[in-house]
């Protein structure tokens, strides 16, 4: 039977940190697109 490889503590911390940072970063990535969205939909900034 194969043994699973163990992840060291620093690697685990790095992986968890990256996963924790991913959600806020992905939310902030679409914000610059609001201007293009407003233009394409021909609407006001409040409507977007």
Image (cartoon, rainbow, N blue to C red):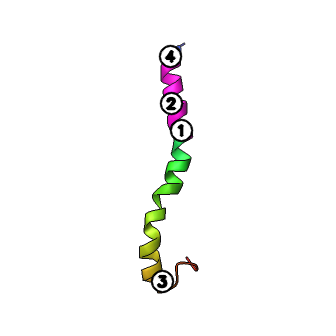
Q: Is residue 15 above or below residue 2?
A: below
Q: In which image quadrant can residue 36 be found? A: bottom left
| Residue at 49%, 28% in the rendered image | 14
Res 34 label: none
| Residue at 51%, 85% in the rendered image | 43
Residue 30 counted in the magenta span? no
The quarter in which the C terminus is drawn is bottom right
The quarter in which the N terminus is drawn is top right
Res 15 label: 2
Going from the N terminus, do you reach mark 4 or mark 2 first? 4
Residue 47 location (% of width, % of height) = 58, 80
Residue 32 location (% of width, % of height) = 43, 64
Q: What is the spatial separation of the Cα atoms under label 1 and label 3, in whole angstroms?
A: 34 Å
Q: Is residue 22 above or below residue 8?
A: below
Going from the N terminus, do you reach mark 1 or mark 3 first? 1
Going from the N terminus, do you reach mark 4 or mark 3 first? 4
- On the image, numbered disc 4 is attached to which residue? 8
Q: What is the spatial separation of the Cα atoms under label 2 and label 3, in whole angstroms?
A: 39 Å
Q: Is residue 26 above or below residue 14?
A: below
The residue nearer to you, when weighing 32 against 1, is 32
Tell me where the magenta segment starts and ends, as one range.
6-20
- On the image, numbered disc 3 is attached to which residue? 41
């Amino acid at each position: 039977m194969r043994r699973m490889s163990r992840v060291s503590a620093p690697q685990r911390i790095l992986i968890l940190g990256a996963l924790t940072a991913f959600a806020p970063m992905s939310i902030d990535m679409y914000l610059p697109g609001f201007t293009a969205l407003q233009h394409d939909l021909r609407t006001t900034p409040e409507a977007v």
